[in-house]
Image: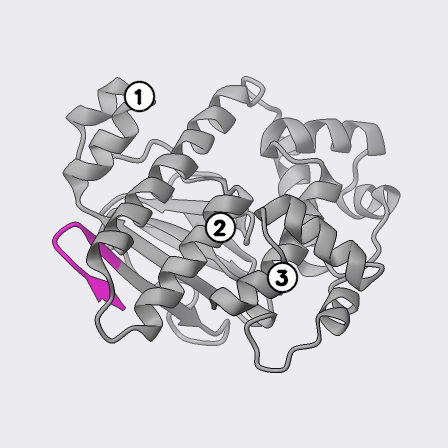
Amino acid sequence: MFASSLVRIGRWRCPSDHPQFLDSGPSSDALFVFPREGVWIEHQGCDPFVADANTVTYYNKGQRYRRRKLSLRGDRCEWFAVAPDAIAEVLAAQEPAAIDRPHRPFPFTHGPSDPESYLRQRLVFHHVARERTPDRLFVEESVVSVLADVTRLAYANQNARPSRPRLRDVDAIEAARDVIARRFTKNLSLPDIAAEVGSSVFHLARMFKARTGFSMHTYRTQLRLRSALDRIRERGCDLTRIALDLGFSSHSHFTETFRQSFGTTPSAVRDAL
């Protein structure tokens, strides 16, 4: 969708029944990716994890990985490639040793995506998709800034995780993320989720927040809000209908939650798009 000497931006749409869904080959560049739909990702030699709209996934050049189906719509995402030296310089602000490994810069497979960064990358992608001559300075500066913000969160999340979590705890947390990603519009209860993943309610709630940085309620709310960004740009969209479809109790509840998360209203974002 966009290419310069510093930044490339693209989109990926792959139905779950496509021959390349399970394995589309190694990553051609160092990428950071914002998923639109939930999908299981497993980097070669690493534990599988749920990649959804609350997640940024990271790939070094040549990284092999596989997918497993979560959403019926397959894998839908936007990807951002930045020149290796620039990535290394960005990461060196958090990890000085990163400056010495520009060809394999990312030390993590995934990390959290804050609401502001998620909205900013969507606006940048919309700009390059709609404009015949995108503003290169705006695009490049925005992408590098988003990379700095989300990787800072990834390092913080990595450092905050309990050391050597038990494998069954990791499995339960990822299973809970799977449940929430598939059913985020539903009025789920904590016992519902805990029973489905085979954990006690207290232990699951505590470990989920320690590993993801979100409570399960906040995690679900963010998935609802990020799904809303896909729908509010539709012409003639009814915000009340969107609010109720996504599980909010009312138009006002949706609007206030959206404003608290993104710092603006749904109607203002619709106008910007």
**What residue would you read off at disc 1?**
95
Foreground pick, 185 / 109? 185
Mark 3: give few (<14), some (14-19) or many (20+) Cα within 10 Å. Answer: many
Cα gap from disc 2 to disc 3, whole angstroms: 15 Å
Q: Position of residue 217 (x, y in %)?
A: 75, 43
Q: Which residue is mark 2?
A: 118
Distance Cα–Cα, label 3 vs label 1: 37 Å
- Does 100 sit above or below residue 43? above
Residue 123 seen:
yes
Given contact means CB atoms under 8 Å apart, are the residues at marks 2 and 3 in contact? no
- Determine the residue positioned at 42% across, 60% down: 123
Under mark 1, the amino acid is Glu
Element marked by disc 2: helix
Q: Residue 67, image x and y in percent? A: 46, 58
Helix, strand or loop under label 1: loop
CB within 8 Å, label 1 to label 2: no
**Quarter of the image that includes the N terminus:** bottom left
Q: Which residues are magenta?
A: 1-8
Label number found at residue 266: 3
Q: Residue at x 65, y 78 (%)?
A: 237
